[in-house]
Every structure is written in structure tokens, then in C-alpha cells.
Image (spheres, helix red, strand yellow):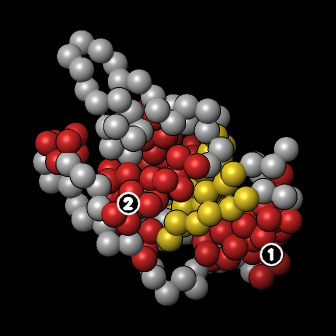
Amino acid sequence: MARAITIIQGHPDPAGNRFGHALADAYAQGAREGGHEVKRIEVAHLDVPLLRTKEDFESGTAPDAIQQCQAAIAWADHLVLLYPLWGGTMPALLKAFFEQAFRPGFAITPAQPGKMPKRLLAGKSARIVVTMGMPALVYRWYFGAHGLRGLERSILAFAGIGPIKESLIGTVEARNPVGRQKWLERMHALGRAGA
């Protein structure tokens, strides 16, 4: 069954020549070959202002570029998020993007006293792809994948997105071309499957 897929490339380097970009390209190519529709968001190319007040988060207006990203997220059945691990979590630019995009009124209903917000992005699934310098097992077991858990629970699942799958790619800098190629092939296969 064909799916609508939005790929969110969260690497903050606008040059676009990182391994994460190659992974996104492989996924997108596989998805198109599998009959899926694909849209892409390149966070590094966006002007993402920082939110500084609760009032702005709850009742401010997202910039036009963020509203276009919200439309691409709302359109999708499946989200694919790719980013490098920086300081144990996502890069600051990607965090700022999520704060701008996943505002009340888009991701959840606005706050009402005594009531939990309604999850407005229910029915969508996601895959998170994280590249890192350390072994993925060390991040998962020793560090508890705390940054990844925060994204899954406090942003995606809180908005109703699920199931959420993970692909953790460790020791990226030390990987030889064969190891990198295997990951590119895996991303291509996941794209074909829309998974």
C-alpha cells in the first residue's frame, strides 16, 4: 500500500554532504521505487527562530517556512527523521524546529485547565535514524538513549505519533565503505517498504 512519507533531515550543516544526507537520499529513492510519495524538509535550510516565552509557544504564529513544514508533516502518513547525535541528543537547530512546528493547535490541542491535550497527529508512524560516533550499543545501554527517548516520548508520542521505530548507526566516522554501503542499502529497503 502506497504511503505519503515526509523525510525530515535534521543535520544542521547546510552543505548537505554528510552521511545522514546519503541515508535520506537512499530512503527517498527506495520509497519512490516502492510507489510511495515523498516530501522532504531540510532543517539546515530553514530560518528557525528560537522560542523564548511560553506565550509565544502557545499562542504565537509560526513563521511561514515552518507552516509549510507543518503542512508537509500533516500530509504524511509516515515521518522519517534523520539527525546526528550531538551532546547525547539532537542538534539545537532540530530541537528549535520541533518547538516551532509542534505547537499547540498543530501537534496538540491548546491547553485547557484540568484537561490533557488531545493528540492531533495520531494515525502517523515514524522512523528515527540517528548517526553517532560512539557504538550504538553504548548509547542505548550505557547512556539509556536519553536524547532519543525524549524525542520519542515528549515530542512525537505526545502528539499521537506511533508506532515509532529506530535505526541507530554507531561509529559512523570509523565505518569503512562496505559498512556504510550496507546501511545505505538498508535505508533503501526501508524506503521501498515505507517503514
Using residue 157 as the reference point, say whether residue 26 is left or right of it. right
Q: Dot 1 surroundings within 10 Å: few (below 14), some, or many (20 or more)?
A: some
Residue 98 location, x and y as percent? Answer: 38, 52
The Cα atoms of the two marked residues, 2 and 1, are separated by: 33 Å
Q: Is residue 84 among the parts visible in the rendering?
A: no
Determine which residue is flagged by label 2: 66
Determine which residue is flagged by label 1: 181
Residue 115 location, x and y as percent? Answer: 30, 15
Q: Amino acid at mark 1?
A: Gln
Q: Residue at x 65, y 47 (%)?
A: 78
Q: Is residue 159 among the parts visible in the rendering?
A: yes
66 shown above or below 123: below
Using residue 18 as the reference point, say whether residue 51 is left or right of it. left
**Number of numbered discs on residues:** 2
Q: Which of label 2 and label 1 is nearer to you?
A: 2
Residue 12 location, x and y as percent? Answer: 43, 73
Using residue 136 as the reference point, say whether residue 71 is left or right of it. left
Q: Toward the viewer: 107 or 87?
A: 107
Q: Residue at x 45, y 28 (%)?
A: 119
The image quarter containing residue 184 is: bottom right
Look at the numbered disc 1 and give the secondary structure of its residue. Answer: helix
Q: Which mark is residue 154?
A: none
Residue 153 location, x and y as percent? Answer: 46, 35
Which numbered disc, 2 or 1, marks the residue that appears first in the sequence? 2
158 shown above or below 140: above
Q: Amino acid at mark 2?
A: Ile
Q: Dot 2 surroundings within 10 Å: few (below 14), some, or many (20 or more)?
A: many
Q: Residue at x 44, y 48 (%)?
A: 147
The image quarter containing residue 24 is: bottom right
